[in-house]
C-alpha cells in the first residue's frame, strides 16, 4: 500500500526525535494514503516555518509484515478513537502514552484544541466532542512509532 508524508525539509532517515508531542496518536512518523492530504500538510509546514520546500515523500507499506507488531486500528470515528486522540493531544511530553508500534485511524479536525477545552470545562459531552472533532471527510492516517514498525516501510 502506498502512503505519503508531507514535509518542508528533505530527509532520507526517519528520526523519531523530530516528532512533536500533542498529535492525534502520539509521537512518531505520520503518513496518509491520500497524496493530496500529504501535500496540504507539506504546504502547512512550509508556511509555518517559512523555510525549505513543499515535499511529498512516497512510501510502500508492507501491510502483510505486521504479525509481530502491536497495531491499533480505528476504522471509523468512535468514542474509543476520540478518547485515544484526547489522551495523546493532551500529552505535551516526549513520553509515549501507549505501547503500539503502529496506529491507524481517522484524522481529527484541526480545531480539536478548542473542543478539548470545551469538554474539560463541561460545556460538551464526550459524544458531542466526538462529533465536533471529526474531520470533514474520513481521512486515514498511519502512525509508525517504533523502530520495528519502520521495517515495514520502504521509501519509493
Image: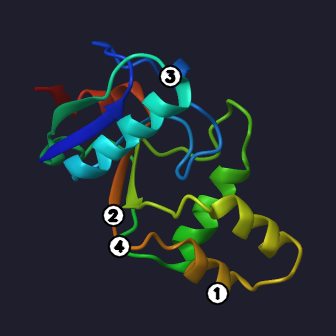
Counting from the top left corner in percent of width and height, residue 52 is at 39, 16
Mark 3 packing: few (<14 Cα in 10 Å), some, or many (20+)? few
Circles 1, 2 touching at the beta carbon (< 8 Å) = no
Counting from the top left corner in percent of width and height, residue 146 is at 43, 31
Question: For the residues carrying marks 3 and 4, which lies nearer the camera in this image?
Answer: 3
Number of disc labels: 4
Looking at marks 1 and 2 on the same chain, the residue that comes earlier in the sequence is marked by 1
- Quarter of image, res 95: top right
Observer-nearest of 52 and 113: 52
- The colour scheme applied to this rendered structure is rainbow
Marks 3 and 4, Cα distance to the nearest angstrom? 28 Å
Say what secondary structure mark 3 lies in: loop
Circles 2, 4 touching at the beta carbon (< 8 Å) = yes
Mark 1 packing: few (<14 Cα in 10 Å), some, or many (20+)? few
Query: Mark 2 highlights which residue?
Result: 139
Question: For the residues carrying marks 3 and 1, which lies nearer the camera in this image?
Answer: 3
Question: For the residues carrying marks 1 and 4, which lies nearer the camera in this image?
Answer: 4
Looking at marks 1 and 4 on the same chain, the residue that comes earlier in the sequence is marked by 1
Query: Mark 4 highlights which residue?
Result: 137
The residue positioned 17% from the left and 33% from the top of the image is 58
Query: Mark 1 highlights which residue?
Result: 127
Amino acid at each position: 500500500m502506498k502512503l505519503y508524508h508531507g514535509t518542508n525539509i528533505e530527509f532520507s532517515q526517519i528520526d523519531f526525535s523530530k516528532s512533536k508531542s500533542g498529535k492525534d496518536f502520539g509521537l512518531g512518523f505520520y503518513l496518509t494514503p491520500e497524496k493530496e492530504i500529504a501535500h496540504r500538510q507539506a504546504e502547512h509546514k512550509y508556511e509555518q516555518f517559512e523555510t525549505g520546500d513543499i515535499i511529498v515523500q512516497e512510501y510502500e507499506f508492507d501491510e502483510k509484515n505486521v504479525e509481530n507488531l502491536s497495531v491499533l486500528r480505528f476504522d471509523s470515528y468512535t468514542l474509543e478513537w476520540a478518547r485515544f486522540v484526547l489522551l495523546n493531544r493532551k500529552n505535551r511530553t516526549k513520553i509515549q502514552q501507549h505501547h503500539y508500534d503502529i496506529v491507524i485511524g481517522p484524522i481529527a479536525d484541526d480545531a480539536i484544541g478548542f473542543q478539548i477545552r470545551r469538554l474539560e470545562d463541561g460545556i460538551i459531552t464526550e459524544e458531542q466532542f466526538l462529533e465536533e472533532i471529526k474531520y470533514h471527510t474520513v481521512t486515514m492516517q498511519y502512525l509508525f512509532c517504533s523502530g520495528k514498525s519502520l521495517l515495514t516501510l520502504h521509501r519509493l
